[in-house]
Amino acid sequence: MGLLTGKTALITGAARGIGKAIALKFAEEGANIAFTDLVIDENGQQTEKEIAAFGVKAKGYASNAADFAQTEEVVNQIKADFGSIDILVNNAGITKDGLMLRMTEQQWDAVIAVNLKSAFNFIHACTPIMMRQRGGSIINMSSVVGVHGNAGQCNYSASKAGLIALAKSIAQEMGAKGIRANAIAPGFIETAMTAALPEDVRKEWVQKIPLRRGGQVEDIANTALYLASDLSSYVSGQVIQVDGGMNM
Ligand code: NAI
């Protein structure tokens, strides 16, 4: 039996990258997987197939996580299709970097909406289901810059700090209902998001990491598995930094 056998996990923004790695890891441990992304194209369909290959139920849903009404609708649909929602991973995220003086209102609003409001939307829609089930694990995908800040990413850092405070608040509000909420703060992880960085910026980041390498998506998936499963049944309101020792 896997660590998540019989559980249903909902992961946002999981057609690729870290979200996909989490979906595959959870499926390997027996969870049925519902995931969302802006569109479910060939990429998303491929992800669906790879998840289903573990012999679990898998379905991708096209939905904008920043949209409150769409989120309610998709969560209701997932509940109808899967019967329960035991694990929620708020993973969808974007960057629109720039120094404060040059940052536009649009850059600020877009990042706060996709990274932070999305988590509110999903927690708001999923926790009534979890409360009725008297249990659930919520994982917010933050970032090391949400703990330490980062020049040129005031919007992103603020959204990621918000995800930590949101997890801690939910942990306090809903602990008595058996719902745990935690955050993961990844450091520099090798994905499409970081591949887009110029080579000199990538090199500079890696120099700051005691383990002298970028993390792999599996490093984050393993931490998510710990937080989603009963291995962490007495852990709530925490932030786990998975960053090769970059920030201590
Ligand atoms: P990615 O860009 O490869 O994947 C993000 C996914 O979210 C994409 O599939 C994208 O289509 C989806 N998405 C974007 N906007 C959405 C929306 N409005 N609604 C639904 N889905 C949406 O990024 P990656 O690297 O896999 O990152 C995943 C999470 O991890 C993000 O929250 C990111 O901020 C966080 N993170 C990543 C780090 C890294 O080094 N890659 C470091 C720290 C945090």
Image (spheres, rainbow, N blue to C red):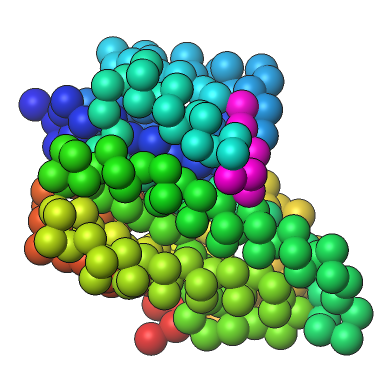
Q: Is residue 197 above or below residue 33?
A: below
Q: Is residue 1 left or right of residue 40?
A: left
Residue 8 is situated, as x and y percent measured from the top left of the image, at: 28, 30
> How many dots with numbers?
0
Residue 65 sits inside the magenta stretch: yes
Write the start and end of the magenta stretch as one range.
62-68
Residue 149 sits inside the magenta stretch: no
Q: Is residue 120 above or below residue 83?
A: below
Image quadrant containing the C terminus: bottom left
| 123 or 33, nearer to the observer | 123
Q: Specify the quadrant of the image occupied by residue 55.
A: top left
Instruction: Identify the residue at horizontal 86%, vertical 76% (top origin).
Output: 103
Q: Specify the quadrant of the image occupied by residue 84.
A: top left
| 78 or 226, nearer to the observer | 78
Image quadrant containing the N terminus: top left
Q: Is residue 106 visible?
A: yes
Residue 160 is situated, as x and y percent measured from the top left of the image, at: 54, 69
Residue 242 is situated, as x and y percent measured from the top left of the image, at: 39, 66
Q: Main secondary structure of the magenta part?
A: loop
Q: Is residue 190 visible?
A: no
Instruction: Identify the residue at horizontal 76%, vertical 69% (top origin).
Output: 108
Instruction: Identify the residue at horizontal 31%, vertical 47% (top origin).
Output: 127
Q: Is residue 205 left or right of residue 243?
A: right
Q: Is residue 188 above or below residue 11?
A: below
| 25 or 232, nearer to the observer | 232
Q: Is residue 190 left or right of residue 1?
A: right
Instruction: Identify the residue at horizontal 76%, vertical 79% (top origin).
Output: 152
Residue 5 is situated, as x and y percent measured from the top left of the image, at: 16, 28
| 68 or 240, nearer to the observer | 68
